[in-house]
Amino acid sequence: MNQRTPTLLYIDDDGALARLVDRGLTRRGYKVVHAASGEEGLEHIRRAATTGGIDVVALDQYMPGLDGLETLEQIMAIPGAPPVVFVTASQDSSIAVTALKAGAADYLVKDVKGDFIPLLHVAADGALRQAELQKAREEAEAEIHASRDRYAALAAERELLLREVNHRVGNSLQIIASLLHLQASSAAQDEVKAALTNAMGRVAAVAQVHRRLYTSQDLKSVVLNQYLDSLLEDLRRSAEGNRMSRLTLKAEPIEIDPDRAVAVGIIVNVLVMNAVKYAYPDGAGPIHVELTSQGDDLLLSISDDGVGDNVKADPRSTGMGQRIVAAMASKLDASVERDPNHSGTRVMLMFRRVPAAAGKPAAAAAN
């Protein structure tokens, strides 16, 4: 594959020296274009900025009209301008510093015999390599920015889709809960009514998580105190037989992932409904839900001041509540215990704030 011959624009009012530069650099693989003044050189560069053709510039310092530093300043203002090697006959190092600060890629001292031409060749090659590296770096940075923009757009789209999914799932579950409520209201048998009401509460507990995720800024976690507060409000409205127990909540603003929040909600639903049904045979009484952090562990307790262990086993009980609590406790890798010192019933679940690497079976206690 043939490589294009690079073009050097030599800006210098000394025509004889320009011819020496032309011969010397042509032998070294360059095409040389001569401009006899700063104004003429700028015109070449402006045309080349849109059409191409100038790869590197060698710019003399002392010229009539615009001198080298003035010309350099205007070259640097042209978008896409080629790199510039500043050339001067002066030995003053301050000129070199000024030229480099103004944007020159390199600097060298010339002589009238053309002995500097090999140095100009080296400087031009270096300026071209530097320009290529700069271009590659800018292209890489542009690609990185474009990739970040694409990632941000995909992340925003994914978040929008997740919100929409949670919204639709929450609505669908709410419809199912409403249908169960209607069915329970029309059921003639108490056992059927109770089963449908319990199922409705468990579905509502899951629906609450999806409603929380739909309205939350963070789709990866659920704030438990807010979730439990809404869940208990649902339970107050749907308490069996309208026996409105005094449900109280004391919970810290702890965040956990949605799957574990669902398990917590279902456990609370089952144990609260058990307390509503069995703790106060003669009416209604207080039921307390507490959630506290103890280091890396969380303690969830559901308690009442009712009859406790003095309650007789309900012959209609299927043990479904116990199996559900056991399954959800296993999902949380939670230990489940009864408080033997509590006058009524107090069930305590201890589980880690962050899931353990491997879950262990947990015993459950539920009526």
Image (tube, rainbow, N blue to C red):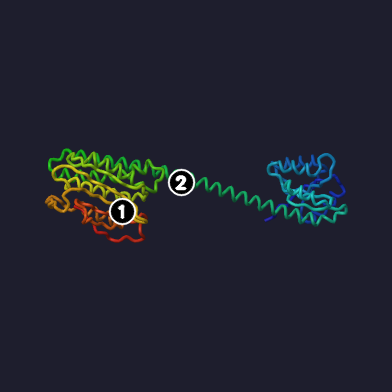
174 vs 108: above or below: above
| Three-letter residue code for mark 1 | Leu
| Three-letter residue code for mark 2 | Ala
Instruction: Rate crowding at label 1 as few (under 14), some (14 to 19) or many (20 or more) other CA atoms within 10 Å.
Output: some
Task: Give the image location of residue 308, x and y in percent.
Answer: 17, 51
> Is residue 320 shown to the viewer in this render?
no
Local SS, label 2: helix
Q: Is residue 331 left or right of residue 24?
A: left
**Marks 1/2: CA–CA distance:** 35 Å
Q: Nearer the viewer, mark 1 or mark 2?
A: 1
Task: Give the image location of residue 129, x and y in percent.
Answer: 69, 54
Foreground residue, 71 or 222? 222
| Residue under numbered circle 1 | 299
Task: Give the image location of residue 297, x and y in percent.
Answer: 34, 56
> Quadrant of the image for the N terminus?
bottom right
| Residue under numbered circle 2 | 155
Foreground residue, 359 or 176? 359
Instruction: Rate crowding at label 2 as few (under 14), some (14 to 19) or many (20 or more) other CA atoms within 10 Å.
Output: few
Foreground residue, 177 or 292? 292
